[in-house]
Image (tube, rainbow, N blue to C red):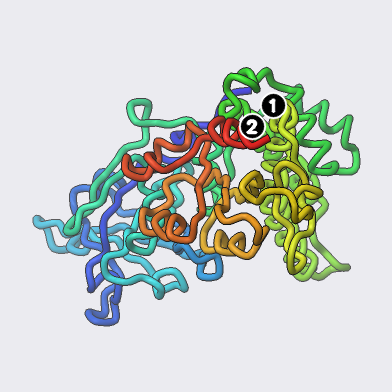
Amino acid sequence: MTPDLLSRHFKGIAVKRLSAVEAHPEKSNQHEFNGVVALKQLFGLEDRRGLPAHFVWLSDDDDDLASAEGFVSWYDSRKKKPPRKEYRLYFPTTVVTERASEGDTVLIGRLQDDSVLVVIAARRTSAEGQLLWLFGAGTTQGHFVFREISKGNDQTLGAAAAFRLDQLGITPENRDDQLLAEMLTRYERGFPTTAEFSEFARKTIVPTDVLSDPDGALMAYVEQEKRLFYIFERCLVRERLEKGFMHGDQPDIENFIKFSLSVHNTRKSRAGRALENHLAHLLEKNNIQFSANCVTENRSRPDFLFPTIAAYRDKNFSSERLTMLAVKYSCKERWRQILAEAQRIEIKYLLTLEPGISPAQTDEMKAHKVQLVVPESIQSTYTADQRGSLMTFAQFIAHVKSRQ
């Protein structure tokens, strides 16, 4: 299976921090960026009006995310008044641009189909750091910086990158006709249970040794299942779209909306469950006792309890030998939910695949005695200071074994 690359989607990007005028165009009645050198490198010197654009607002609050469809226009505002040229990039007001504030990061990407992606990320958030990491970019206060997406600075879209691309509305491109044919034969009625699909994904690859490198094995499993999911999903969605959404001779808008929401919700729910499935498999392979999704106080359900739920409920069993592991594909603000889980256990372990969480957020986690567990390959997206307090999955396994 050929891995997906960032260059399959993007030609280049330009990035900067927003000025007050750009963040609040009503102050100057302008809805445009000045056509500086970086934007000329991105769009060229020919007028490009009405380019379809997807606008995305990112922050660390799941309830605050927003997106909108629109357009941008790149043009020489003095085209009829030569010889001087004055390029501008016009953009409309959207629910995304309305959220922008001075100092937020704006990233403008030109996709391979010549459409445009405009992303605004709240300043000093994990979302901002992850966006810059994904494109290998930095920001400057006063002007755009251009970055061409080519062989020299391309990257393979693993699980960490796919996590952010999905929020930008971009689905990784994967293709494997042989595996697709096998899935269509196995699962005639669509996706099977997440446990069955996870097992199928593990059988289609030969990962690194689950005992000597559980971090590598976990990432291999997760990334393979994500690839298979997108391959199968693309086929199923195409088949449904080809049937159309008509009720008699009228467009069936309600059913189209329901279908769209179903696709989105399936992606989110299956990603989290798949991660838990692969973790359970690796814990078993490493001879770790555990109980999964068992009820503790106040009807809370920790993802994993060690050694067992029976030991946890036994008041004579030392709490110092108990461990809990929460699992969240991405943390956002939701990590605080785990603080009320397994009240006999003081330190809460939290495994996540989210890259580059902000130092402010990881400091808050430490203050609440939350220990982050991050697979080794993702830890490079964190700062050097942060990495000193992160735990790999292999280290977590060794820690639990020492208590059993």
Tell me which amino acid carries mark 1: Asn
Nearer the observer, 250 or 42: 42
Tell me which amino acid carries mark 2: Lys
Nearer the observer, 73 or 1: 1
Determine whether 73 is above or below 227 in the image. Answer: below
Query: Which residue appears farthest toward the front when viewing the image?
Result: 316
Determine whether 319 is above or below 67 in the image. Answer: above
Residue located 81% across and 49% down the image: 310
Position of residue 375 in the picture relative to residue 99 (left or right): right
Say how many tags the image has.
2
Position of residue 282 in the picture relative to residue 362 (left or right): right
Q: Quadrant of the N terminus?
A: top right
Decide which of tag 1 and tag 2 comes sooner along the chain: 1
Badge 2 is on which residue?
401
Q: Please say if the residues under marks 1 and 2 sit with CB atoms less than 8 Å apart.
A: yes
Can residue 165 be seen at all in this image of the molecule? yes
Residue located 28% across and 67% down the image: 32
Residue located 26% across and 80% down the image: 29
